[in-house]
């Protein structure tokens, strides 16, 4: 039976301009260079790191630097975390670049039944391949993708772009954690800022730090830029600024009960030799979230800021 068109309109998710890079933007020159190099070499680059590590800031700096159009796509949980929403945000630039394929995508979506996403993705990729000045698509907060189909779409998009099936289209993706299949495109997780960068930041804010203050601040925050910003803008008055504490509570509240229980246990006993085998999968999940990392001699290290927060809290 021939497909028929439905009177409905294909979903459209809004795009917004890239946010400006933070000022001052310090301590990320090496990370920015690595990000640009991977995009030039492979066409796809993936950033991960704990909440507040500076992923969005680094992508904003990238958007301000590249000499090509940039489309900024942010995934919002419950709003734009589905496969259809992601698809239409990814293909939205074609409305201006290739109007005919863009209209075809709407026709395919409005058929009864609608054509599968895989088919429509192939049409979109072919259209991008014919664009001379292809954009850089930046997908931020990708950990909020809520459907298995949406995750599969993101993986397929990365694979096709890296294989050159979308011409000169480039793709940068960031999230607190991302699918295992994107690991080949992942840069090292964003580490905390070092002492010279933090001092340069403080100096730019006209509040240079004494050596002891600087050392204590790095221990307390782990060099996480968002926590540092909270502290520096509040005059380095409290071990953990209220904003940082609220964000940490939100981060830990999003963990599964088994993950929270293991994090509490590791805070008090980091020896992996005593960890039951059935809890190794939970440990892997905490590693994927960059909350813990395995050390030497069967030990585990908890992120400094998270560890400092955990030891001051009652057990969940």
Image (cartoon, rainbow, N blue to C red):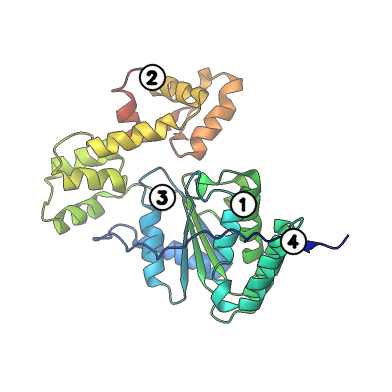
Residues tagged 1 and 4 counted as in contact (Cβ below 8 A)? no
User: Which of the two discs, 4 and 3, labels the residue nearer the N terminus?
Assistant: 4
* Residue 268 circle label: 2
User: Which of the two discs, 3 and 2, labels the residue nearer the N terminus?
Assistant: 3
Q: Quadrant of residue 278?
A: top right
Q: Is residue 244 left or right of residue 31?
A: left
Q: Residue at x 35, y 62 (%)?
A: 19
* Residue 190 circle label: 3
Q: Residues within 10 Å of mark 1 (few under 14, many from 20)?
A: many
Q: CA distance from mark 1 to mark 3?
A: 27 Å
- Residue nearest the viewer, comparing 304 with 162: 162
Give the residue pinned by disc 1: 83
Q: Which of pointers 2 and 1 indicates the residue nearer the eye? A: 1
Q: Residues within 10 Å of mark 4 (few under 14, many from 20)?
A: some
* Residue 111 circle label: 4
Q: Does residue 284 appear in the picture of this structure?
A: yes
Q: Residue at x 46, y 21 (%)?
A: 261
Q: CA distance from mark 1 to mark 4?
A: 17 Å
Q: CA distance from mark 4 to mark 3?
A: 44 Å
Q: Residues within 10 Å of mark 2 (few under 14, many from 20)?
A: few
Residues tagged 2 and 1 counted as in contact (Cβ below 8 A)? no
User: Which of the two discs, 2 and 4, labels the residue nearer the N terminus?
Assistant: 4
- Residue nearest the viewer, comparing 38 with 114: 114
Q: Which of pointers 1 and 3 indicates the residue nearer the eye? A: 1
* Residue 91 circle label: none
Disc 1 secondary structure class = helix
Q: Residue at x 15, y 55 (%)?
A: 205
Name the quadrant of the C terminus: top left
């Amino acid at each position: 039976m021939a497909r028929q068109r439905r009177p409905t309109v294909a979903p459209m998710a809004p795009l917004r301009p890239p946010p400006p890079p933070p000022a001052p933007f310090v301590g990320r020159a090496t990370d920015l260079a690595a990000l640009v190099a991977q995009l030039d070499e492979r066409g796809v680059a993936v950033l991960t790191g704990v909440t507040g590590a500076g992923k969005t800031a680094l992508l904003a700096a990238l958007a301000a630097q590249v000499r090509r159009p940039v489309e900024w796509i942010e995934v919002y949980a419950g709003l734009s975390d589905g496969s259809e929403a992601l698809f239409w945000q990814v293909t939205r630039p074609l409305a201006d670049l290739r109007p005919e394929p863009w209209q075809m995508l709407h026709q395919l979506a409005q058929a009864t039944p609608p054509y599968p996403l895989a088919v429509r993705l192939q049409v979109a990729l072919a259209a991008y391949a014919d664009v001379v000045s292809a954009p850089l698509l930046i997908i931020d907060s990708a950990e909020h993708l809520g459907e298995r189909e949406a995750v599969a779409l993101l993986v397929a998009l990365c694979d096709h772009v890296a294989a050159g099936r979308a011409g000169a289209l480039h793709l940068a993706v960031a999230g607190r954690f991302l699918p295992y299949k994107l690991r080949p495109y992942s840069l090292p997780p964003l580490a905390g800022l070092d002492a010279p960068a933090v001092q340069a930041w403080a100096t730019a804010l006209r509040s240079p730090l004494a050596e002891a203050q600087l050392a204590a601040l790095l221990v307390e925050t782990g060099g996480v830029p968002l926590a540092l910003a909270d502290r520096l803008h509040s005059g380095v008055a409290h071990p953990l600024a209220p904003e940082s504490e609220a964000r940490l509570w939100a981060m830990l509240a999003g963990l599964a009960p088994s993950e929270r229980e293991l994090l509490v246990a590791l805070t008090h006993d980091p020896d992996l030799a005593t960890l039951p085998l059935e809890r190794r999968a939970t440990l892997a999940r905490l590693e994927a979230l960059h909350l813990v990392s395995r050390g030497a001699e069967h030990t585990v290290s908890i992120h400094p800021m998270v560890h400092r927060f955990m030891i001051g809290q009652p057990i969940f």
